[in-house]
Amino acid sequence: MKSVNVLIDKIYAPASTVTPADVEALKPEIEAAGALLHNGQGKGNDFLGWVNLPSSITTAQFDEIEAAAKTLREKADVVLAIGIGGSYLGAKAVLEALSGSFDNLTAPQKGKHTKVLFAGQNISEDYMWELMEAVKNLDIAAIVISKSGTTTEPAIAFRIIREEIERRYGKAGAAERIVAVTDAAKGALRTLATTEGYKTFVIPDNVGGRYSVLTPVGLLPLAVAGVDIRALVAGAVEMEQLTATAPFAENPAMQYAAARTALYRAGKKVEILASYEPKLQNIGEWWKQLYGESEGKEGKGLFPASVTLTADLHSMGQYIQEGERILFETVIRIAQPDHTVTIGADKDNLDGLNFLAGKRIHEVNRMAILGTMLAHVDGGVPNIAVELPKIDAHTIGALLYMFEKACGMSGYALGINPFDQPGVEAYKKNMFALLGKPGYEEAGEALRKRL
Ligand code: PA5
């Protein structure tokens, strides 16, 4: 089985207005969008560094990341990865996907079980207090990640965490326990890292935050957590090559981009990314940022939502089945789980489950997936399936790259720049104004009158 298989035949459901001819008609447009990503002639072309990023990572770069990760692991029971948005979601998603669901029950221990915890992805005082409380008797280190080096949420978290690290280990000790991942030259974080003598990794200029998981932004925290980053990148390299060369009908990124574009043009407004594996929940969070921030512009774009099934069939299932018909689903399906659990027979059969005796839970899950797919399709919710042979570093790397490539193509087909995010600034301006940041006084006064 290929690392990632995209099946779009269930978008042509009886109740769907999309036909195979509609998807075929998009072939020239999607191919042209793919060409723009490679020839750099499209919008936002100064942010295309991710296109050939996986295959351009050198052995020396892997070595450097792994060496830094090893140093942090040797010094710390817990490494705090500080970042937000594209500087957080990729590492969080991959780490969760590749960890045991209950690894948090294993005590953190430097070297063997160094844990990565995240900070700076919110401004919750309770989160910050509880995090510092949780690590008060553990050895800590930090990776601070910010491309701009000026983002408020991670900057606040880093100030607090840096003070704690300096208090415990002194300035010189802190310099051995803090690694910064940021721009090569610009931003407050770069200045701070240079002044304090921190080890640093550079986020390439031409890779935007939400496309940066395969740079040190994602790779360093993942390496600290013990993820096989070479296998992750190898999966992405495989997908980079496949999506650059495979014809439309065999190209998973093109098939996915064409299917979702056809559905959008047929009136669908919301794409729900669904999976039946709880450990993929944060892949959904990463994917939402990728597509939401890339496409939601100029009054256009599918709204990306995510669910974890079957849990959410008992909360969102009703709406998906019978609510507004503005939805379609993209469902990640896993062919083989890692482990085997078989349902036993019970002589009394009081729970009435003996019809499942001898079956693996995976088989029940598979029937839930197929049954739900047909029910939703019949209810007017077209279905795209994204099949992975299993969850491992290689397939997750391939999946991430497939989604990135399809996002670039979908964005171009939508006619927007998929690589900027001007709308993110609005809340920041208001927050700074309300906080009285120098330069925002007048705006602050105007806003306060409205509250
Ligand atoms: O995709 C993006 O560009 C954003 O989500 C950023 O990653 C996010 O705002 C964090 O920015 P920075 O890395 O500059 O702190």
Image (cartoon, helix red, strand yellow):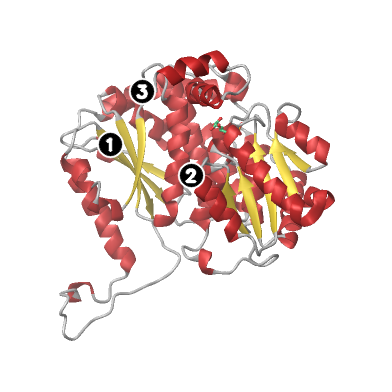
Marks 3 and 2 sit apart, C-alpha to C-alpha, by 23 Å
Residue 247 visible in the shown view: no
Residue 262 visible in the shown view: yes
Nearer to us: label 1 or label 2 = 1
Residue underneath mark 2: 399
Q: Which mark is residue 328?
A: 1
Residue lying at 50% horizontally and 35% vertically, measured from the top left: 404
Residue underneath mark 3: 26
| Three-letter code, disc 2 | Leu
Foreground residue among 249 and 210: 210
Local SS, label 2? helix
Foreground residue among 375 and 247: 375
- Position in image of residue 121 (x %, y %): 54, 42
Earlier along the polypeptide chain: callout 3 or callout 2?
3
Specify the quadrant of the image occupied by residue 352.
Answer: bottom left
- Position in image of residue 62 (x %, y %): 72, 48
Left or right: residue 15 versus residue 151 is left
Marks 1 and 3 sit apart, C-alpha to C-alpha, by 18 Å
Q: Is residue 287 depicted above or below 21 in this figure?
A: below
Ligand 1 quarter of the rendering:
top right
Q: Which mark is residue 446?
A: none
Crowd around label 3: few <14 · some 14–19 · many ≥20 (10 Å): many
Residue lying at 44% horizontally and 56% vertically, measured from the top left: 279
Residue lying at 84% horizontally and 50% vertically, measured from the top left: 172
Earlier along the polypeptide chain: callout 1 or callout 3?
3
| Three-letter code, disc 3 | Leu
Local SS, label 1? strand
Nearer to us: label 1 or label 3 = 1
Left or right: residue 417 versus residue 375 is right
Label pair 1/2, CB-CB below 8 angstroms: no
| Three-letter code, disc 1 | Phe
Quadrant (top left, top right, bottom left, bottom right) of the C terminus: top left
